[in-house]
Image (spheres, helix red, strand yellow):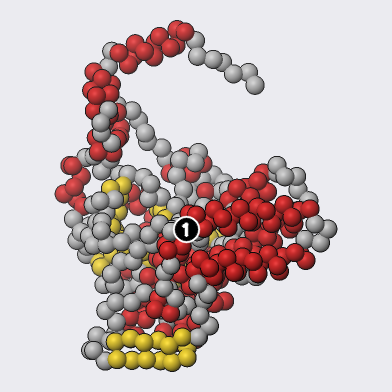
Amino acid sequence: MNFKGITKEEAVACSQSYQSSTLCHAMTNALYKNNVKDLAYCGAAMPDTQFQYSVEIPTLEVTNQKHSGRCWIFSALNLLRERVAEKCGLKKFELSQNYISFWDKFEKINYFLETIIDLKDRPVDDRLLTFVLQTGVADGGQWDMLVNLIEKYGVVPKSAMGETFQSSNTADMNHMLNTKLRQYAAKLRAADNPRSLKSAMLAEMYRFLCMCFGEPPKQFDFEYVDRDGKYNIVRGMNPKQFYDTYIGLDLRGNYVSIINSPTEDKPFSRTYTVDYLGNVADGSPVHYLNLPMEEVEDLIVRQLKDGQLVWFGSDVGQRGDREHGLWNTQLIDLDNTFGMDFTMSKADRLDYRESAMNHAMLITGVNLGENGKPTKWKIENSWSDQHGDKGYYQMSADWFDNFVYQAVIQKKYLSDAQKKALETEPIHLNPWDPMGTLAD
């Protein structure tokens, strides 16, 4: 390396630029006792953030994932529970997030062990192996991973498998789990026949998950009182039977995951998959169709107009106000507050790791302006009802364009050209690609 150090002259010049700036001195005083976002908060943006929409789908009360990274599970089950509530006439209802989380963890454990066996001959400092070991098994996931779980295990009402402290507060459990997985990795790499060790490892991890989550029910009674006050009970249901009876959607055949990644390495109208990203080893891989943002927006609006909710993924760490439930690029004015330019293109934010998808939610409404274009979107979050509009959030149109990366759309809304693009051979992405980040 032939690096150049900071010269004395450069250090003096930097000091002089600070000392001569009135803004810098004012901000130094202000930042001493105040949060950066509070100082940069732009109240002038508030009049445009009313929770009123021209297209709005009635939905149930929000849920609460608490201290866990299961947003992708909560948001998907929030979409599916509306089918059950409508069919059974329910005012309140949740599907068991814990049930899906149990099987997701168990399948990810197997996926991790199979990956270690597959990479057995690579050196321990190999980039791919290092990434797998560092990542371990986490809470996050993708739409296709959720579909794999439902196809294999079905779903159950929350009454059949409720939350535990560990399912709602996963950090310590995940730490223990990943310690064991790295121990297993060392044993598998040292073994002549590593697959012979896997069954015992899976059995030990199953016991551990049962201790943390409880054991998933194989059969249960579905008991409820409908809107008319009528008591109902259906005895002896199993999870797949419950899904087929009360939800019955063909998630694999009728839905597609679309993304917007305007980077040079990902041409639009092509499909993509991410290597070593999955949970069910014998399930289907992650599959994306990359489209321009205006096409993504159009598809979402069409689905909403038909009364259908939209699962989506975005970067919620950008320009947000959790207390008021807002994501708005005008709300946090860092540029004028600090006299610095923080602008980056969406492509640059992805390429240079400034942004990536980190949270999944539901779009339940949109406000369309006089030109027919969205001005703001209504969001069903899973962070309790203590923020925003009873737990519902809002994102501005500009925020949507900049920080939404994925949405799940029914295939019937695709144009002929988009359907043709969906049939292209998927391009394989590295597991550390920004489109490989898991919603958590």
Q: Position of residue 417 (x, y in %)?
A: 50, 64
Closest to the observer: 381 or 249?
A: 381
Q: Residue at x 37, y 59 (%)?
A: 66
- Where does label 1 land, which residue? 170
Q: Residue at x 28, y 64 (%)?
A: 365
Q: Position of residue 158 (x, y in %)?
A: 40, 76
Residue farthest to the front, as pictured: 211
For residue 51, which quarter of the picture? bottom left
Q: Quadrant of the C terminus?
A: bottom left
Closest to the observer: 72 or 287?
A: 72
For residue 111, which quarter of the picture? bottom right
Q: Quadrant of the N terminus?
A: top right
Q: How many marks?
A: 1
Residue 293 is at least partly visible in this image: no
Q: Is residue 375 left or right of residue 135?
A: left
Closest to the observer: 197 or 292?
A: 197
For residue 273, which quarter of the picture? bottom right
Q: Position of residue 15 (x, y in %)?
A: 36, 13
Q: Position of residue 54 (x, y in %)?
A: 22, 64
Dot 1 alpha-carbon crowd within 10 angstroms: few under 14, some 14 to 19, many 20 or more: some
Q: Residue at x 37, y 50 (%)?
A: 316
Secondary structure of residue under mark 1: loop
Q: Residue at x 18, y 47 (%)?
A: 46
As displayed, is residue 220 above or below residue 332?
Answer: below
Q: Is residue 121 left or right of residue 355?
A: right
Q: Is residue 190 left or right of residue 327?
A: right
For the residue marked with disc 1, what is the amino acid? Thr
Closest to the observer: 143 or 69?
A: 69
